Amino acid sequence: MKNQIRKTILVLLLLLLSTTAFAGDYQFYFFGINTRFIREAKWQYVVLGATASVATHFAGHVLYGKTAGYDVHTTGFWKETIYNASSSDAANFARSGFIAQSIVGLALTSFEKSRNWDFTKGFVAMSALEIWSYPIRYGNGGGDIDLINKSGGNGEVEWAGSSVIALHNLFREAFQKS
């Protein structure tokens, strides 16, 4: 049932983003992104922003675990494990990656100048992709959502909240401005 809810939410988000709109000058939009942006973007900054998003998620876990005084083991940027943590600290450790991405994304999209950077576009797009695909990538258990559930929280509700913030950041971004 939980996987079905996750997949339904993800499909609805993708449908929302896949609307095609036309402006007065007949510009084409693909998944809500003006194709002019695709042609004019400085892709090295978009890639740097996307990489920073993944690193921010990872750093959020490590920073929380270390500041709380726990041993944290990492395997690349994809697997972080906290040892001997209480249930509440394990849940906080699990949610810290999503929180870090959300805070940085909100900060980048809160100011007109930084909102128009290609770095910001890469950051918020990768954050949304990473958050929205989380239930698919970890559908068989494991990952942050599962750890929140095992620690007494509601991982699906928290994932939905992070998904809404990611959607908010995408809509604040200037993908559609020419």
Image (cartoon, helix red, strand yellow):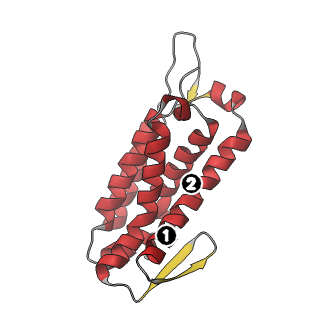
Residue at 41% in and 71% down: 94
Left or right of 117? Residue 170 is left
Left or right of 4? Residue 29 is right
- Residue at mark 1: 63
Numbered circles on residues, count: 2
Point out the residue furthest to the bottom here. 84
The answer to which image quadrant residue 37 occupies is top right
**Front residue of this view, candidates 161 and 3:** 161
Q: Locate the N terminus by quadrant.
A: bottom left
Q: Position of residue 157 (x, y in %)?
A: 29, 60
Q: Position of residue 177 (x, y in %)?
A: 54, 22
Q: Locate the C terminus by quadrant.
A: top right
User: What amino acid type should be assigned to the residue bearing mark 1?
Assistant: Leu
Q: Position of residue 31 (x, y in %)?
A: 53, 35
Point out the residue furthest to the top here. 24
Of badges 2 and 1, the one in the foreground is 1
- Residue at mark 2: 53
Answer yes or no: do the residues labelled 2 and 1 have beta carbons within 8 Å?
Answer: no
Residue at 49% in and 81% down: 81
Crowding near the residue tagged with mark 2, few <14, some 14–19, many ≥20 C-alpha atoms within 10 Å: many
